[in-house]
Image (cartoon, rainbow, N blue to C red):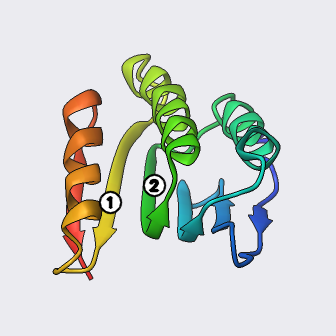
Amino acid sequence: MSTRMDRYTVPATAKTPVLDLEPGKGLLMISGCSIPENADHFFTPLLEKVTEYGTDPAERTVVRVQLSYFNSSSAKYLLDLFKELEDLHAAGRTKVSVEWCHAPEDLDMEEAGQDYKALLEFPVKLVEV
């Protein structure tokens, strides 16, 4: 019997994105603007939830990122998040993919997605929205 964890949701604020981890669906959504006053305080609970998720992940895990803007400290924590998922992917625990969503004219966000794609060992799909 699965003891899959509960959904983890953090609402958006003016400076932080929505975080929505649905373990049963293998879906993590990060959407909005990410310029938290304290990135460690904001992202550490998410990283802990993803570690917990890794004990009983869905067969496939999709991370959909749709940020309008993020700062350098958020970029570091996103990479930490992706590396945590990459470990699960490499261990064969779940098939991870990232959907990096960006507006067609937002070249900075598209480039950021390309950068993550180059750093990661699982599929990163750039999606124009």
Disc 2 marks which residue? Answer: 63
Name the element at disc 2: strand
Viewer-proximal residue among 40 and 24: 40
Query: Can you give x and y, in whole percent of width and height, for residue 58 in the image?
Result: 54, 45
Query: Can you give x and y, in whole percent of width and height, for residue 20 in the image?
Result: 66, 65
Three-letter code for the amino acid on which mark 2 is drawn = Val
Three-letter code for the amino acid on which mark 1 is drawn = Glu
Query: Can you give x and y, in whole percent of width and height, for residue 15 in the image?
Result: 69, 69
Q: Earlier in the sequence, mark 1 or mark 2?
A: 2
Viewer-proximal residue among 27 and 100: 100
Disc 1 marks which residue? Answer: 99
- What residue do we see at 49% from left, 59% from top? 70
In the rendered image of this protein, does residue 23 appear above or below residue 67?
Answer: above
Query: Can you give x and y, in whole percent of width and height, for residue 75 in the image?
Result: 48, 43
- What residue do we see at 41% from left, 23% from top? 92
Q: Quadrant of the N terminus?
A: top right
- What residue do we see at 22% from left, 69% from top? 127
Viewer-proximal residue among 16 and 128: 16
Mark 1: few/some/many CA within 10 Å (<14, 14-19, 20+): some
Q: Answer with left or right where residue 19 lies relative to residue 96.
A: right
In the rendered image of this protein, does residue 97 appear above or below residue 119?
Answer: below
- What residue do we see at 56% from left, 47% from top? 74
In the rendered image of this protein, does residue 20 appear above or below residue 88?
Answer: below
Could you tell me how far apart the alpha carbons at marks 1 and 2 are, in whole angstroms? 6 Å
Q: Which mark is residue 121?
A: none
Q: Are marks 1 and 2 in contact (CB under 8 Å)?
A: yes
Asked which quadrant contains residue 29, the reply is bottom right
Q: Answer with left or right where residue 111 lies relative to residue 38.
A: left
In the rendered image of this protein, does residue 116 appear above or below residue 93?
Answer: below
